[in-house]
Image (tube, rainbow, N blue to C red):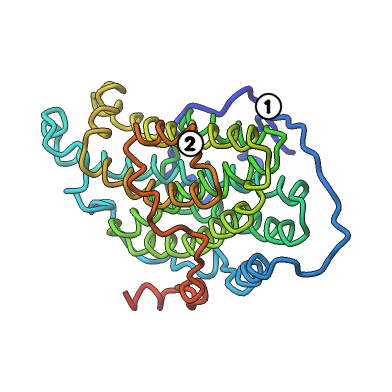
Amino acid sequence: MLNVKLVDGPPQEIREFDDEVVHHLTGEDVEVIREIFRTPLTGSYNWDYEDANAKIRKLYELGKRFNWDAQMDVAWDTPFPHTEYPSAPEMNAYLGNPKYEALSAEDKLKFAWRSQSQTLSQFMHGEQGAMLVASQLVSCAPTFDAKLYASSQTFDEARHVEVFHKYLVERCKTIYPINPNLKLLLDKVLTDERWDLKFIGMQILIEGLALAAFQSIHMTTRDPLLRQIVELVMRDEGRHVAFGVNYLENWIRALPEHEIEERAQFAYEACVIMRERLFDTEVATEFGFTRDEAREINHNAATGQAFRDFLFERMIPNLKRIGLLTESVRPKFEALGVLKFEDAVHDGLIDWASLEKPLPVGPLAIAAE
């Protein structure tokens, strides 16, 4: 019998798993936890089934060609013990802090694995949000090409939720609750009635954040299994961001000026949230830090600054390309110190050769690294 629990907000407890639990769960052990959101979504039929946008249709075709199976194409039996740090210890923002240095070697290792669990948990929660938004776009996108692509993206995002959940349960054995600020951003995108704001929020901002985070993990992880997973996911996300930039650039510029300004302000506010409030503070509190201490350490660390630069180096040129770096918000972005990236390469210039490379699937892909 299905066990359903309706909640007013996401659960706040940290979920722990062990091999005994993971391999003996049955349907009766699973509790379905639902949080309701409501949206005045306006959908549309499209009766013109022809190819109207060659770039968008090609991205859709690539999505079909390079589908991968989270169960069959990932080398899940690749060993990586919990006695090893999941990423290079010198990348730890807390390194040199007296409270951190006072921890035992065992606790420092535990800190590293818990931090990875927290980060990947946000990936998983964010991918569920992306799946929900993409499913909305199937209904409300105004053209048939966009509906086709959004339908394929919905399946991509479902696969991403699946693969990160499996890694968290089987490798990290811990799942953290969603960051409240990420939840706030997802709620805004999901419940807004404007289809193009959903595009901006998901395809440009949240997917741009995800790509930067995935690239950072791909460069720093010591676990070959996670590197393979992230590489597969990045291939999908690269198509998604390219879709958003190419689809939005003409649409946004045709809007009335006041509507462009509304969307530019939304993009700025979302960037502030991503820059200032998506730091991991929960894990640090388990090891004696206050949330304010953890936020300050992450904000001031060289690794934190490098990630923020990485994020905005990709996001700001995309916002400029689609017309949302308006004169009214430019001073606000300047105050964030990110306008220096406005002339960097944007994702409207699609790297077709990269997107058409063979997928790194199976144990042979890991063995070749």
Picture residue at 74% right of the left edge, 52% below the top: 138
Instruction: Please tell me the numbered disc located at residue 316.
Output: none
Q: Residue 280, percent across and down?
A: 35, 34
Q: Are marks 1 and 2 in contact (CB under 8 Å)?
A: no
Q: Quadrant of residue 283?
A: top left
104 to 63, vertically: above or below: above
Horizontal arrangement in the rendering, residue 251 relative to residue 235 (left or right): right
Element type at mark 2: loop
Picture residue at 88% right of the left edge, 59% below the top: 47
48 to 26, vertically: above or below: below
For the N terminus, the image quarter is top right
Q: Earlier in the sequence, mark 1 or mark 2?
A: 1
Picture residue at 49% right of the left edge, 42% below the top: 325
Q: Residue 214, percent across and down?
A: 40, 54
| Residue 125 vs residue 331, the one in the foreground | 331
Q: From where the camera sits, is residue 178 visible?
A: no
Q: Residues within 10 Å of mark 1 (few under 14, many from 20)?
A: few
Q: CA distance from mark 1 to mark 2?
A: 45 Å
| Residue 178 vs residue 358, the one in the foreground | 358
Q: Which residue is mark 1?
A: 6
| Residue 325 vs residue 170, the one in the foreground | 325
Picture residue at 56% right of the left edge, 29% below the top: 10
Amino acid carrying label 1: it is: Leu
For the C terminus, the image quarter is bottom left
Horizontal arrangement in the rendering, residue 304 relative to residue 358 (left or right): left
Element type at mark 1: strand
Instruction: Please tell me the numbered disc located at residue 327.
Output: 2
Q: Quadrant of residue 194?
A: top right
Q: Residue 98, percent across and down?
A: 11, 29
Q: Residue 133, percent across and down?
A: 65, 44
